[in-house]
Amino acid sequence: MATFDTIWNEIFNKIQKNGEDALNTVAAQAEYIGISAAQISRIKSGKSSLTDNVIESIVKKVSEFDQEYAKTLTDKLKKVQFESIKENLGITGRHEVVESLVDKYSIKKAEELFEKLSNSKSLLCVDYRDFPQATIGGSYPVLAERAGEAVKKGLRFALFQPFGTAESLREMISKLNKQLEHPKVMVTLKAYMYLYELTIKVRQVYSMMKEISKGGLGQIVLYEAQIKEPMITAIGLQSRLFLANYFEGNLHQKQIFEWVTAPNNEHFFIERSQLSLDLDAVGLQFHPIHKFWEENKTLPENIKENKKENIREKTELSDAYKSYALETLLGKGIVRWQNWSELKEER
């Protein structure tokens, strides 16, 4: 069977015959196709498998000069993809069985979810406990576009980052830097530097989606936990958790999904069983934002007056905590969320 390397070389032999010059490096070739050079290098070295988005980008570019060849290219690249996934996950079996398994948990399912929720009767909450993959340079930047388009059509999209603000994490890193004489501080310092990088990446992906969607107040919001001294142990590092809260006609539906990154940069989007993960418990993780949405069909924000943007003070988020009893019942035991926006950094 053809390898990715042989197919890649075959493609660029055809491209150069078509009159394109100076495409002799992986960086130049990747730029021509419109994908990350680092990602192509990982695929060529066997450190990562082909993704659907890479296949689509290659086929789309090739179809510009040779549509017949592009039609055969999809099948060739899909076969390489399936063989790689089989090898990385230790799956044996017929090609069609593997294809069915890969399709069932493909990241394409995330794109389908955004399409399904592209209306004003839908809320999607996402909890970021590892790096987002829809950033520029991530494995699936196209999902930022899908999310932005869904928000443009009415979806309310709430992003949650539970490890504290970039500012509070910087303070923690500064404290740890002053204690480097302790032998085990370096391990803790590296962990908090990872969380700081995660915080910045989540802000970046939020800004991308916000820009694409042109979303106004209450449409797409990034909520950061207000923690003066962020803790890893009390929160936990894991994968991204999605709570879809939507209406089909008069029927109120909820689903839980998880985005898992496996070895060799394999990505899977899996619907979680409600037998092992309680919907109400997951909803509490996003309290009080999802409850506010169920009653108001918008996302709560605290906004201070900004004359340039003609925005008056809004305290919906603060008021939401008072409206849904838990603040009274649990007091300081609940997570306090604060919406982040670039406006705050400009003031």
Image (cartoon, rainbow, N blue to C red):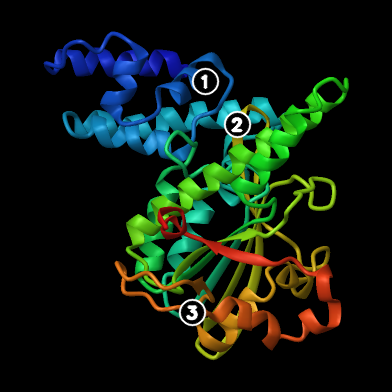
Gap between marks 2 and 3 measured at Cα: 42 Å
User: Is 49 left or right of 178, judged from the image as shown?
Assistant: left
Vertical order, 171 against 244 (above or below):
above
Between marks 3 and 1 in the image, the one whose residue lies nearer the viewer: 3
Q: Position of residue 74 (x, y in %)?
A: 37, 34
Q: Position of residue 286 (x, y in %)?
A: 68, 68
Instruction: Return the residue at label 1.
Output: 42
Instruction: Please tell me which residue is depicted at 50% across the width and 49% down the height of the picture.
Output: 203
Res 342 → quadrant:
bottom left
What amino acid type should be assigned to the residue bearing mark 3?
A: Lys
Gap between marks 3 and 1 measured at Cα: 47 Å
- In the picture, the disc for residue 314 is 3
Gap between marks 1 and 2 measured at Cα: 9 Å
**Label 1 with label 2: CB-CB less than 8 Å:** yes
What amino acid type should be assigned to the residue bearing mark 1?
A: Arg
**Where the C terminus falls, by quadrant?**
bottom left
SS for callout 3: strand
Return the residue nearer the eye: 284 or 321. Answer: 321
- Which badge, 2 or 3, is on the more N-terminal residue? 2
